[in-house]
Each structure stands twice: as C-alpha cells, then as structure tokens.
Image: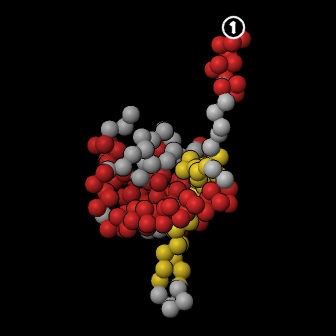
Amino acid sequence: MEDNGARAVAVQKLMAAKAKSGKSFSNIGAETGLTNVYVAQLLRRQAQLKANTAATLRAAIPALTEDLVELMMQPPFRSYDPEMVHEPAIYRLNEAIMHFGESIKAIINEDFGDGIMSAIDFYCTVDKVKGADGKDRAVITFDGKYLPHTEQKSANMMSKLARNAS
C-alpha cells in the first residue's frame, strides 16, 4: 500500500509533468479519449492507468517518466483527506449532494426500481457552459451503471450451494 507521503510526492511529480505539458485536464482528456475527471483521477493517484492507455497518455504528457507510468499502472490506494471537505468547492459539492440527494434517490427508485448508481462502473465529466444569462456555469455529469438491490434468497447463495454439494 502506498503511504500518504509517497503518494503526495508522486502526485506532485505527476502534476508537474502535466504543468510542463501546458495542457488542461480537458485538453489531455480530448487527446486521450478519457474524461477530464478520469485524467485528474489518474494524475492524483485515484485511478489505475491501464496498459492500453499508457502510450496515449505519455504522448499527451511527454514529461511522464517510465517510473511514473509504471507507478500509475499499479492499483492505487483510493482515499481522501477528511480535511478536504473544508475546501469551498468540495464543500459545495457535498452540500449539493446532501441537499438534492433524497430527490435524486427518489427519481432513481421511480425510474429504475430499488437500487443504486455504481461509483465503480462510472464516468464523470466537468464541463463549462454559458447560462441563459451569459454567465459561466459548471455542468457536472455523473454517469453510473444502475445496480438493483438483490432479494437475498438463500437458495441463490453460491457459498450455501457449494457446502450442500459436498
């Protein structure tokens, strides 16, 4: 497991390579075919770089060293600093989810049934658009696979079936 100090050093190096490219997360995403948020997740060691994407990412960020690419291909320790919620943008995102969460859940249940949206089979983007008033607006899209809750019948439990077969 990557300790916080090693992760922080790696993230600094990754962000320095991005800065050296002069490109935004959105620019890199457009070049690589990845979402802008996923690019940010990769460079913050919150997602694993897949082998078939490594060359494309290195082409988009030439300062990425082989060592950094190899590190990015290792499964990350996904976590967050609890103090981060005090950062105003993150605080407002949490506030929006908490404020609208019950209504979003009600609509998911109404449209899909009893279940949840996956945060594993999940895409996220941040886009900048002009509002009706001509002012900049942020559009955050969560695109997650729907996962229905399962009725837990013991007859369907593989562990019970395996035990009963032996």
Q: What element carries label 1?
A: loop
Q: In x, y percent, where is residue 71?
A: 45, 41
Q: In x, y percent, where is residue 76?
A: 45, 41
**Colour option used:** secondary structure
The quarter of the image holding the C terminus is: top right
Location of residue 55 with respect to 93 vertically, above or below: above
Q: In x, y percent, where is residue 144?
A: 60, 55
Location of residue 138 with respect to 70 vertically, above or below: below
User: Residue drawn 31% across and 47% down?
Assistant: 9
Is residue 70 or residue 164 the one in the foreground?
164
Location of residue 138 with respect to 32 vertically, above or below: below
Task: Tell me if residue 29 can be seen.
Answer: no
User: Residue drawn 63% across and 33% down?
Assistant: 152
| Amino acid under disc 1 | Ser
Task: Tell me if residue 27 can be seen.
Answer: yes
Instruction: Say which residue label 1 marks.
Output: 166
Query: Which residue extends farthest top?
Result: 166
Instruction: Please give the count of numbered marks on the rendered protein.
Output: 1
Query: Which residue extends farthest bottom?
Result: 133
Is residue 162 or residue 30 the one in the foreground?
162
User: Residue drawn 34% across and 53% down?
Assistant: 12
Label 1 CA crowd tier, 10 Å (few <14, some 14–19, many 20+): few
The quarter of the image holding the N terminus is: top left
Q: Is residue 74 left or right of residue 89?
A: right
User: Residue drawn 50% across and 91% down?
Assistant: 133
